[in-house]
Image (cartoon, grey):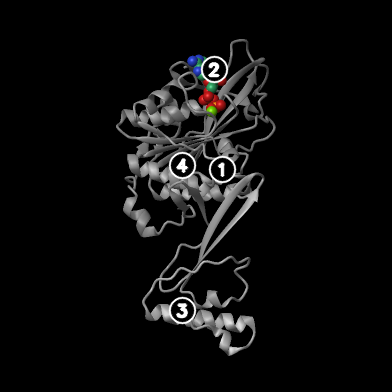
């Protein structure tokens, strides 16, 4: 090797000359060269960084018992790169890199997307709810179902997938709360057993959003799925490595964007703390992210707890504003009548408008 030792000068100068000569030689020999080094900051002026045609920076950190690894292409001469930090995982098969969700090159997304036909709707399979939505959920939309524990979010999600299966559509579910089994959600367990629905294996520790998106999109493509469920966002957040929880909202936006790019219709559930005095419907302020929102609540009527739900929004579409009572039985959700003449329902303590309530109750089950 033609070393720079003869040139005298400072060690930095000799390194610079060495690297330049090395670079020239390798180019002359038309060799593709990988240089590997341990550096602590990409901001230090280092002759290697200047000479190299490409620069891939790897970093890792340990945060609350979890190892997080990320890489970034700082430069790659003559070609466009996907900007940003890419999380990666080292496994027995080598390195697997997860492009930042939503950073898929547009032509690549377009090539695989099955854009839903304009005006097409996906039914949720609960007649009253589809009617409240204005005839089902527009295809390609994302729907947030928010409600307290036990309000039937998971049951509605299963119904959405079952309705797809009835129409020959396949679905993918990322279940973060508990593994769906026959005792807990028989309908869903049957859909998974029959192959109509794929359960995303999301049990790996230290998950990142990018990895979840990568896994989800992989399953969607493999099974040509058109319906996707994420149950629930609260469980999802807990499954993430702590460092990714900090920018959860931002990451969710990337998730929703990536899913909408592939053209699927999405149902996400979100646990709502049952604070009767508080009208917010999503603990993450994620409501703005989704195209449609259904809220489920418990209300107290004459010392009984009853369930009501309402459609809060469906982007660019007419929908019902009614607050409807509903019940659950072995066949699923049944939407009852609209609750009439009540005020303060969402506050959980309704009072009848214009005087005391007559004996027979507010709404019959329909
Ligand atoms: N066969 C049934 N008969 C009556 N109620 C049922 C039946 N199955 C489930 N439920 C009701 O549904 C609730 C669970 O719904 P689920 O969708 O799991 O709630 P979550 O909103 O927490 O996901 C139970 O708490 C129960 O009240
Ligand atoms: Mg649930």
Residue holding disc 2: 363
Binning the other alpha carbons within 10 Å of mark 4 as few (below 14), some (14 to 19) or many (20 upward) gives many
Residue holding disc 1: 287
Q: Nearer the viewer, residue 66 or 227?
A: 66
Kindly state the secondary structure of the residue where label 3 is placed.
helix
State yes or no: discs 2 and 3 in contact (Cβ < 8 Å). Answer: no
Closest to the camera, between mark 4 and mark 3, is 3
If you read the primary sequence from the N terminus, does the residue marked by circle 3 or circle 1 appear first? 3
| Residue 139 drawn above or below residue 328 | below
Kindly state the secondary structure of the residue where label 2 is placed.
loop
Spatial CA distance of label 1 from label 2 is 29 Å
| Residue 116 drawn above or below residue 166 | below
Mark on residue 23?
3
- State the residue at coordinates (68%, 35%): 278
Q: Nearer the viewer, residue 31 or 177?
A: 31
- State the residue at coordinates (52%, 47%): 209
Spatial CA distance of label 2 from label 3 is 81 Å
x and y percentages locating residue 183 in the rendered image: 48, 18
If you read the primary sequence from the N terminus, does the residue marked by circle 2 or circle 3 appear first? 3
Q: Is residue 343 toward the left or the right of residue 102 in the image? A: right
Q: Is the distance from the Cβ of mark 4 to the nearest ligand 2 atom less than 8 Å?
A: no
């Amino acid at each position: 090797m033609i070393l720079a030792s003869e040139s005298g000068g400072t060690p930095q100068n000799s390194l610079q000359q060495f690297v330049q000569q090395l670079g020239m030689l390798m180019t002359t020999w038309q060799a593709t060269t990988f240089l590997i080094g341990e550096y602590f900051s990409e901001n230090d002026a280092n002759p290697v960084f200047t000479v190299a045609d490409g620069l891939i920076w790897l970093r890792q950190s340990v945060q609350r018992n979890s190892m997080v690894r990320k890489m970034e292409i700082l430069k790659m001469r003559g070609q466009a790169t996907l900007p940003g930090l890419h999380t990666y995982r080292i496994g027995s098969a080598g390195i697997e890199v997860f492009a930042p969700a939503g950073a898929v090159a547009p032509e690549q997304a377009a090539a695989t997307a099955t854009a839903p036909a304009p005006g097409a709707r996906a039914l949720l399979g609960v007649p009253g709810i589809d009617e409240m939505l204005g005839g089902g959920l527009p295809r390609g939309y994302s729907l947030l179902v928010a409600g307290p524990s036990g309000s039937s979010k998971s049951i509605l999600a299963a119904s959405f997938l079952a309705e797809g299966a009835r129409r020959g559509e396949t679905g993918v579910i990322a279940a973060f709360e508990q593994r769906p089994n026959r005792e807990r959600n028989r309908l869903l367990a049957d859909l998974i057993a029959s192959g109509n629905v794929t359960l995303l294996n999301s049990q790996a520790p230290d998950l990142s959003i990018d990895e979840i998106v990568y896994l989800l999109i992989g399953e969607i493509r493999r099974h040509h799925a058109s319906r996707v469920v994420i149950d629930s966002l609260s469980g999802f957040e807990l499954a993430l490595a702590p460092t990714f929880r900090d920018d959860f909202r931002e990451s969710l936006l990337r998730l929703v964007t990536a899913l909408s790019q592939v053209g699927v219709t999405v149902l996400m559930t979100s646990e709502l703390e049952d604070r009767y005095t508080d009208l917010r419907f999503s603990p993450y302020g994620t409501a703005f992210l989704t195209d449609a929102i259904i809220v489920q609540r418990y209300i107290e009527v004459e010392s009984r707890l009853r369930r009501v739900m309402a459609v809060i929004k469906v982007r660019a579409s007419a929908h019902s504003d009614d607050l409807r009572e509903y019940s659950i039985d072995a066949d699923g959700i049944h939407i009852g009548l609209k609750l009439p003449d009540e005020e303060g329902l969402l506050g959980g303590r309704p009072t009848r408008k214009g005087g005391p309530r007559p004996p027979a109750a507010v709404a019959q089950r329909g």
